[in-house]
Amino acid sequence: MQAVRRFFQRLFFFLFAALLLFEEWGWEPLAALFARLARLPLWATLERRVAGLSPRMALLAFGLPVLTLLPVKLLALYLFGKGHTVLGLVLLLSAKIGGTAIMARLFQLTQPALMQLAWFAWVYPRWKAWKDAVLVEVRRSSVWRSAQSMKQSVKLWWKRWQR
């Protein structure tokens, strides 16, 4: 029984770590990509309004994309069930990437307002510390070190090939 429990703990850790790594990898670049849209006058006005929301409205604005993406993810699961694996995967990945981009930018815009909520100001630093500790563990793992080594090898090969 202990072995089964340990297996599921490791499986959960691996899946959750993979999700955190994706978020970590995509959060800043995708937020920066969305921030470029602020060059457009209409988008800049929208961002100013979002940044000026009250704490409760900021929480609603930050949570809304999660709710709007849920039907898209359910549609992807439906497509998987109907045998449309590639289409379901494309839809799911698009929703994940697009959702991460939107959430990252919204968080940048709403974080000052969200930090005015006592419970959020208490939870967020703890969540960040816990997430960072998980990422440290992942980066210490042999799988991560092997992947980094392989990445460096591919980069070197690519540079040599370009010459």
Image (cartoon, rainbow, N blue to C red):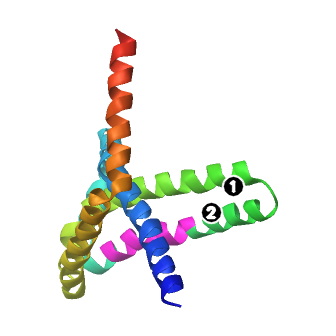
Between 48 and 1, the one lying in front of the other is: 1
In which quadrant of the rendered image does the C terminus lie? top left
For badge 1, the amino acid type reads Gly
* The image quarter in which residue 70 lies: bottom right
Q: Earlier in the sequence, mark 1 or mark 2?
A: 2
For residue 27, side relative to residue 76 (left or right): left
- Determine which residue is flagged by label 1: 88
Question: Badge 1: how crowded within 10 Å, few (<14), some, or many (20+)?
Answer: many
Q: Residue at x 32, y 56 (%)?
A: 24
Q: Which residues are magenta?
A: 58-69
Residue 71 x %, y %: 63, 68
Point out which mark residue 114 bears.
Answer: none
- Determine which residue is flagged by label 2: 72
Q: Residue at x 49, y 72 (%)?
A: 11
For badge 2, the amino acid type reads Val
Mark 2 and mark 1 in contact (Cβ < 8 Å)? no
In the displayed structure, 31 sits above or below 115; it is: above
Mark nearest the camera among 1 and 2 is 1
Q: Residue at x 50, y 57 (%)?
A: 96
Q: What kind of element bears circle 2?
A: helix
